[in-house]
Image (cartoon, helix red, strand yellow):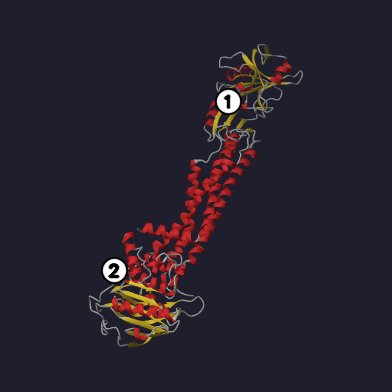
Amino acid sequence: MERFSVLRYAWKELSRRRIRTLIGVFGYAVAVAAVVTVASVAKPRIQNQANLLLTVGTHLVGFIPDPAYPRDKAFGPCAQGVYTAMMRAETLRRIQEIRGVKAAAPYILFQKQSLRDNTTVTLGGLDLGNVATEINACPPGDVIQGRYLGPGDTNAVLLEESYAAAARRGVGDTIEAFGRTFQVAGIVNTNIRAARASLYAPISVVREILVESRCVTAEVGDFNVALVEVADARRMEDVRRSLANLLANASIVSFNCYAPARDAVAATNTAAWVVAAVIALFVTLFAARTQWASVVERKRDIGILKAVGWPSGWVTRQILAESVLQSLAGGVLGCLISFLVILLVPSSGGPAVPAAGSEPIVLGWAVLAGIALALIGGVLAGLLPALRAYKLTPSDALRRL
Amino acid sequence: MENNVVVECHGLSKVYPRRNGAPVKAVDNVDLQVRQGEFVLIVGRSGSGKSTLLSLLGGLDRPTSGSVSLRGKALEATSDRELARIRMENVGFIFQDFNLLPAYTAFENIEIALAPTPLSRQQRRERVEALLRRFDILQRAGHLPAELSLGEQQRVAVARALANNPMLILADEPTGGVDPVTGKEVIEKFAELNRRDGVTVVVTTHGTFPQEAASRVLFMKAGALVSREVLPPEGHSRIAPSGGYGAEGPPRNTLPKV
């Protein structure tokens, strides 16, 4: 009985103040439409862009320069043009345990300088099948001729395209390097990868060559460059710091050129939600103001209801019901507006746009979120006015000024 | 306490604090006892505290000091919810200008008084229609207050006050602001309620209400009852001047008790 009466009289009050009610409903509709549209259209696109950017620029290369390495030696482990110290297998295990590290691979980069023509040839030892190796050094996708290396390739190498051209070698040819004769299995173009070399061979082979050269001692599992792939671009800085702490005096090289774009996408994402939140906030404040004005205007009516025996709780619930009914109607209308916007406004193309078949639609959770937002807004907007109505004594409400 | 006392107060005071200036003592140490079947008229100038006294007697407001009891139930000790229930079951209010809800029809204005009761919608409808019929405004049931004459508005207000079959009617300046013809109608209506239904009536007025209609006239000045005068109940043969009708009271209106 009570619920029926309260809802009935709430509906009557809303009908009585039709224009004000419609303005309130429209306000909620705009807020919900903004939220649902942002969630359904912008959010997946922004997320797609972010996902793309979050998976690039996530590689790090760590090595420990060795200033004590004899300068007169023509060969030795190196990285970025400097000789480096060797690291143990245990170090790699600890790198893999760093929070945010997706994969870590051992890499041996070995260089030999020609004293005759002052040229440098580098040999990269690949930990085959490791994601970090593929991203930082040489993946199968970089092969432009021939084939990639397999675990059993103890006598085969890949040649960097520019080096192959200079050495006039092609697939199937043999090449003398680092005291061995290799067969050219493939030509690769590794472009700007952080740990590129002139030749690539399996790491076990390169480690043997390093040991045979007697320039350094190296046990099984030793390496001089750590290739690290970070799980998510947002964790780059954390991983970078952890790696620097782990490897004393290390140089950490990363390709962080995507960070500004990533930050821009994050900013766009945040801005979209901030705009939606600000709209929702203003609508709630506006609705609260309207509802407050309604209570002030109806002070006398509230006094009459209380005088004839309506408990204060009923009056409070009626005010709240009015606010929630408005917000619910606005929520439903907002979802419909959002549906029309998504249906009628053409979407632009581009790599970040979802592929065909996954065009933006009004998302179920977005609709629920929009309705929930409207409901919360309705309750919040009605709370203070309802409280005021609750506290109003019948005599105060009916007192003539 | 005598068991035929409907409402009584002792040492009743109400003080309104003011932000700037001294507090206003609207009701000052009032003692009053109203017995069943009495028609009490409280006369006083504007601002003398009549409306505040009526609010305190009907449980619309709480006193600053003193006590009020309705049918022996102390109002100052009850919760707001309980007070609302006591008002709903025992008191019918009629306000100056009638205070009808402007957006509600005559039917709905009466029905709102029945909303807090456990009556079904059908029972409420029957009760409201009976009241509208009794006051000869059934044909105006669907009209808004603005579409009714002052006399019709006044009848709707009286019907609303009687909706829950109260034992006490409190009317605040019911003839203030209405024309003489409507005022006469109002007076007759209260006399009839008191005479025919035996409802206890307390009416405040600043002088427009004829004193001969009442069984007792009280005068109020600056929040206090300054003198009391018991008038002979001319034309009120069913009113017992010295103490009402006794414990069983006079016959109530013919509507079933809620």
- Quadrant where the N terminus of chain B sits is bottom left
Q: Chain of mark 2?
A: B
Which quarter of the picture shows residue A228?
Answer: top right
Using the rendered image of the protein, determine whether residue B161 is visible from the camera's viewpoint. Answer: yes
On the image, numbered disc 2 is attached to which residue?
A: B255
Circle 2 sits in a helix, a strand or a loop, which is it?
A: loop
Q: CA distance from mark 2 to mark 1?
A: 97 Å
In the image, residue A53 sits, relative to residue B184, either above or below, namely above
Q: Position of residue A259 (x, y in %)?
A: 63, 38
Give the farthest residue toward the right. Answer: A117
On the image, numbered disc 1 is attached to which residue?
A: A106
Using the rendered image of the protein, determine whether residue B63 is visible from the camera's viewpoint. Answer: no
Q: Position of residue B219 (x, y in %)?
A: 38, 86
Q: Residue at x 42, y 75 (%)?
A: B151
Q: Residue at x 40, y 59 (%)?
A: A6
Q: Chain of mark 1?
A: A
- Quadrant where the C terminus of chain B sits is bottom left
The crowding category of the residue bearing disc 1, from other C-alpha atoms within 10 Å (few below 14, some 14 to 19, many at least 20), is many
In the image, residue B200 sits, relative to residue B124, either above or below, namely below
Which quarter of the picture shows residue A218?
Answer: top right
Q: Which mark is residue A7?
A: none
